[in-house]
């Protein structure tokens, strides 16, 4: 005869489930499009921080033309719009052509990408050839401690010139921007995330 679960059975079941929780694990999920939101957030945040270092107050009140011919990067539209927004915030008027401008601001990207670093204490995933068979068994990774870090990096060069004389009007230092997101695993527990991204983009 089948008996109904007692209160003791329920408590024991909950306790067993709680004991299994620390053995859980997690993975970093990648999206299906060629570029994930994770990648775009890291790069665009690095761009925001690089452009924010531009001393745009040097050009306040002037009519400027943005020369982006040398801005060769995959996120070019975002860099241009971020720069236009920042300049307008400082009272710079954006001209549609060189002829209508007092100032020409050339911009180029020296770096706009992501570095990934992996650190593992434990056994990496290894291929294990099966004898007498044309197959390879992949032995799973066994981490004691694992860390994956994504660093977004931006390096922007700004060169302001007088639109009439073609002489440089100011020396603008290179503008750097960084963003970072790190994932940690301890044994099979994780990932635990630390990030410098804005809260709404995490």
Image (cartoon, helix red, strand yellow):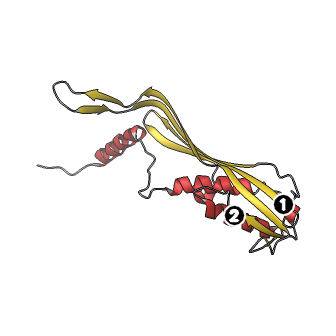
Does the rendering let one see residue 198?
no
Residue for point 73% across, 57% down? 107
Single out the mark in the foreground, 1 or 2: 1
Q: Residue furthest left?
A: 1
Q: Which mark is residue 20?
A: none
Q: Residue furthest front?
A: 165
Report x, y in % for residue 120: 49, 30
Q: Position of residue 84 (x, y in %)?
A: 73, 67
Q: Position of residue 202 (x, y in %)?
A: 57, 55
Judge by depth and name the residue closer to the eye, 150 or 56: 56
Q: Is residue 35 left or right of residue 15?
A: right
Check the image and report above or below for 60 versus 40.
below
Closer to the camera in the image, 87 or 202: 87
- Quarter of image, res 129: top left
Left or right of 182 on screen, residue 90: right
- The Cα–Cα distance between marks 1 and 2, rounded to whole angstroms, is 20 Å
Which callout, 1 or 2, points at the residue further toward the start of the chain?
Answer: 2
Q: Residue at x 22, y 33 (%)?
A: 135
SS for dot 1: strand
Residue 74 seen: yes
Query: Which is nearer the eye, 111 or 165?
Result: 165
- Picture mark count: 2
Question: Residue 31: which quarter of the image?
Answer: bottom left
Which of the labelled discs sits on residue 82, or is there none?
2
The secondary structure type at the circle numbered 2 is helix
* Residue designated by label 1: 161
Above or below — where is 6 with respect to 107? Answer: above
How dense is the environment of label 1, judged by Cα within 10 Å: few (below 14), some, or many (20 and up)? many
Residue at left offset 39%, top offset 42%? 18
Report the front residue among 81 and 118. 81
Count neighbours of disc 2 (C-alpha within 10 A) and say few if under 14, some if 14 to 19, many if 20 or more.
some
Percent across and percent down for residue 72 are 62, 56
């Amino acid at each position: 005869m089948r008996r109904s679960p007692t209160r003791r059975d329920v408590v024991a079941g909950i306790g067993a489930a709680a004991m299994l929780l620390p053995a859980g694990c997690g993975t970093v999920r990648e999206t299906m499009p060629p570029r994930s939101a994770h990648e775009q957030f890291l790069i665009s945040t690095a761009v925001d921080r690089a452009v924010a270092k531009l001393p745009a107050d040097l050009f306040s009140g002037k009519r400027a033309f943005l020369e982006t011919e040398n801005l060769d990067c995959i996120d070019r539209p975002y860099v241009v719009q971020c720069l236009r927004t920042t300049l307008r915030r400082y009272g710079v008027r954006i001209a549609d052509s060189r002829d209508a401008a007092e100032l020409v601001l050339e911009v180029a990207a020296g770096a706009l990408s992501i570095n990934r670093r992996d650190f593992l204490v434990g056994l990496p995933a290894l291929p294990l050839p099966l004898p007498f068979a044309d197959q390879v068994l992949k032995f799973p990774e066994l981490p004691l401690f694992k860390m994956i870090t994504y660093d977004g990096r931006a390096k922007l060069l700004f060169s302001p010139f007088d639109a009439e004389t073609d002489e440089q009007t100011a020396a603008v230092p290179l503008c750097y921007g960084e963003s970072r997101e790190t994932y940690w695993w301890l044994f099979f527990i994780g990932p635990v995330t630390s990030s410098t991204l804005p809260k709404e983009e995490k």
